[in-house]
Image (spheres, rainbow, N blue to C red):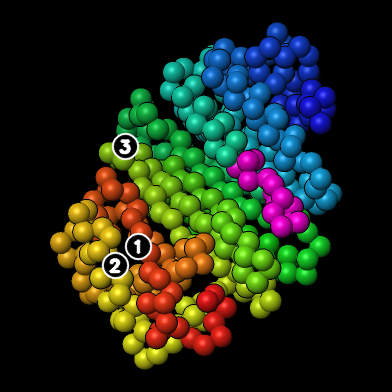
Amino acid sequence: MIRLLPALSLLVLPSLTTGPTWAASFDCSKASTPFEKAICDNPEISAADERLAKAYAFSLAGLSPSAEAAVKKSQQDWLSYAQRACSGDNETVTNGTFDERMVWCLNQIYSSRLRALEMSRIVNGHRLYPVSTYASYIDSYIEEEPDFRWPVGQHELTIVQFDSDAEFVPGLNKALRDLGEELSSVGETDLEGDDAPGGEDATVTIGLQQLHWNDRISFEVSSQWYPHGAAHGGYSTSYRHYLPSEGRFLSADDVFEGKNWTLDLAKITAAALEAQLSDILFPESSTSEGLEDIVGDVERWNLSNELGLQVQFQPYEVAAYAYGAPSVFLLWEDLAPLLKEGNPIH
């Protein structure tokens, strides 16, 4: 496989001819565009380009023709995106050189692409591969401030897909693509004002968390966003649990039952918050008031531990931003009175 890399690097940078590789994944003596020269002139990006070429080559290994075509399209879309997203006008840079801001930006874009490609693997006999979509939009604020540090809003969406003959796979892959479309602003061009996509950077990643045999497949959804010029960005973590035998995502009433189960679960969660996280909680967070909507939301349920349910909170919900996104763990045995008989989880 390693001996194939020089030829495969053409798929990473199609405009270049392969040759001696000492810095990037291509012969830097033939670099001609500002983008290519930026890669060659910066050791960190050159090293990232080499890693990207290897990751891309391995991500294609063993894929069916349709899956391979999807990964190649994602790579081509990324290459086009990478050449314009760090510019000052959301256009491919054709003259001059990449300045310090642009180099920093390009390094970030390489890092995110590497993370996406590293989702490629085999789990329980199922070949997984990433499909990514990229979009960039001009930030209208540069009309008022031409030297604004964030002239272009960068939006990235990466979704894991299954390349397998299993009967449930087409339905699962579509459900994940639909979810990505629902959660990501990639492709939205009709928003205005504060909602305009150019005013922030946003990344949504839907990756496999756990394949529980073949009766449940859990996914972690990671969302990150940075409103341009803000003191800091935001992020959230949520989960989706797919039931292959039923061709749908798990719902809360698959697991719990009873007239007031959300209130009862909120009380148990409040007690767990006080016991496990009392030193960082907001004063009002250890009461059941306000927790019902959170604990009753299946998207907050991390089911990776067979001993219990981990409830995920987002930043600022129960503690200060500095403490991140806390979670509490509830043993199934403590939840037994609320559980629906024959539920697909426990």
- Asked if the residue under mark 1 is in contact with the one under mark 2, i.e. CB atoms within 8 Å, the reply is yes
What are the residue bounds of the magenta stretch? 116-129
Q: Which amino acid lies under the numbered mark 2 shown in the image of this protein?
A: Ala
Residue 121 in magenta? yes
Q: Position of residue 239 (x, y in %)?
A: 49, 62
* Left or right: 162, with 277 as reference point: right
The residue drawn where x is 63% and y is 61% is 211
Distance Cα–Cα, label 3 vs label 1: 33 Å
Which residue is disc 3 drawn over?
A: 229
The residue drawn where x is 49% and y is 46% is 203
Specify the label residue 328 is tagged with.
1
Residue 61: image quadrant is top right
Distance Cα–Cα, label 2 vs label 1: 6 Å
Q: Which amino acid lies under the numbered mark 3 shown in the image of this protein?
A: Gly
Specify the label residue 272 is tagged with.
2
Q: Secondary structure at mark 1?
A: strand
Specify which label sits upstream in the sequence, 3 or 2. 3
**Relative to 32, is 56 above or below?**
below
Residue 206 in magenta? no
| Residue 126 vs residue 228, the one in the foreground | 126
Q: Residues within 10 Å of mark 3 (few under 14, many from 20)?
A: few
Specify which label sits upstream in the sequence, 3 or 1. 3
Quadrant assignment for the N terminus = top right
Q: Position of residue 142 (x, y in %)?
A: 37, 33
Q: Nearer the viewer, mark 3 or mark 1?
A: 1
